Image (cartoon, rainbow, N blue to C red):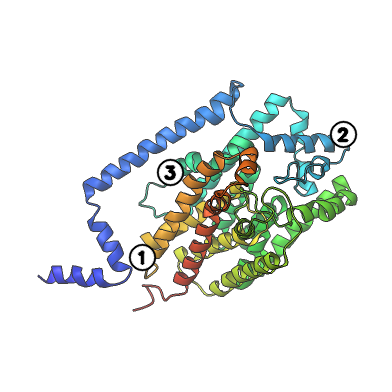
Amino acid sequence: MVERLGVAVEASVPGRGFRTLSERLRPPALRRHGLLLIRVAAIAATVGGLIDFVLTPLQGRFAGEFEDYKDYLAAAQAVAHHGDIYATFLDHVQPIPVQGFDYPPVVAWLLQPLAALPSSTAATTWLLLLLACTVAGTAIIAFELLPATWPRLELAAVFAFLYAPVTYNLWHGQMSAVVYLFLALALRSWLRGKQLSLGVYIGIAALIKIAPVMLIVLLLRRRWWAACASLAVTLAIGVGGGILTLGAGTLREYVTRVLPVLGQQNGWIYNQSATGALNRLTGHSVLAFQPPSIVLTIATVAIAVAAVAAVAWLVRPSEVSRDVRGAQFAVAILAMLLAGTVTWFWHLGALLIVLASVAALVAGGTIRRPRAVVIAGLAALVATGLLAPLVIGSVSMSGLIALRHTGLWWPVLQLISAPAVTIAALFVVLVVELRRPSRRTAG
């Protein structure tokens, strides 16, 4: 009787009841069967991934489009022949989507080895590099965030080979896989208190894709001045290296001609930032760039400021649990994805950091009301890993143009915004829950 009463009382406690009920619904036999299914899925995903991304490419039969790689190769060749690395990009700024090389100059210089290799060898080498970054990044995230009792290796294999935003990079040769690895390494340094390497990893990621520089708010709020210094030095070396190797004129072209295009308001279907969703909400700059809207500009800036302010409000220099510290990094990743003018679908691989941190928070019983966090996390996973690839994969430019003149145009655009909406919802839920007193401190 006392034991039953204890279970009833425990189930009535917010958060604790959620875990107790879930544990009662998972008897040992069911847990064993679940673990077996995960292991089977991991083996199948790994075998399929090795066939798709190793065996088939080595045989010269890779089925990926690899159009992003072609832009990198063109930039590497332009460097080798002293040409304009941004010529292709500037020739394709209308309509959306833009095409061509749009990275800082130092990246083009680092890509030069691609131009020196035979074409098939260079493409296969690049794919294997991206695969290594993907697998390593996912494994780091799993082993740094997930509980030790979980099948972390198996889950890393499943998500490395089956999560659509991550595998997109492999099928298309997209450099976001490299950024993904450095964000995972930054997470590891953040959790382990390694300031110098943290600043370096964020700096390298920001030299490839500018958005990660926003993570500096974590360093400032925690008063990690050594990390801030290493970040600044890394950025200075990258920018300076670009000037030394390709000249100040190339950097000037990047700043004055490339960045303004990337900063334009656009609602292209791959753009899952807050500004992308707002543009689709108003039907603005979806198929082609249109003059900027003052209302959208104000709304976008307000969202960016609010996102950064929320991260700053959440992070403190005082010591907290490892789960909470990981969740703080995750919230900063969400803010980074929402605040930029461009967050392409393939950038969403970083969401695995967030999903793993959510799993750690719930499994560890750190937050008092995990139900909302679980629901928001699952919604983001489904929207980014299943819904978005299905919708995006089923539409084309000609199809969108035809759809524009029908009553389905606006509803379809909002459906396409599902990843951005669920990411925003997860951001709000995490911020609110992390600011509540935790179960471990609430008495």
Instruction: Give the alpha-carbon distance from disc 2 to disc 1, as whole Å.
Output: 58 Å
Q: Is residue 110 above or below residue 192?
A: above
Provide residue 39's location: percent of width, then percent of height: 36, 39
Quarter holding residue 307: bottom right
Residue carrying label 1: 365
| Number of numbered tags placed on the structure image | 3
Q: Nearer the viewer, residue 403 or 230?
A: 403
Q: Nearer the viewer, mark 1 or mark 3?
A: 1
Mark 1 neighbour class, 10 Å CA radius: few under 14, some 14 to 19, many 20 or more: some
> What residue is rendered at 52% in x and 75% in y?
318
Instruction: Give the alpha-carbon distance from disc 1 to disc 3, as whole Å.
Output: 22 Å
Instruction: Give the alpha-carbon distance from disc 3 to disc 2, as whole Å.
Output: 45 Å
For residue 255, side relative to residue 167 (left or right) = right
- Quarter of the picture containing the N terminus is bottom left
Q: Which mark is residue 153?
A: 3
Q: Earlier in the sequence, mark 3 or mark 2?
A: 2
Q: Which mark is residue 400?
A: none
Q: Nearer the viewer, residue 51 or 71?
A: 71
Provide residue 116's location: percent of width, then percent of height: 78, 29
Provide residue 89's location: percent of width, then percent of height: 78, 43
Provide residue 152's location: percent of width, then percent of height: 41, 47
Q: Is residue 56 above or below residue 236?
A: above
Q: Which mark is residue 81?
A: 2
Indicate the amino acid at tag 2: His
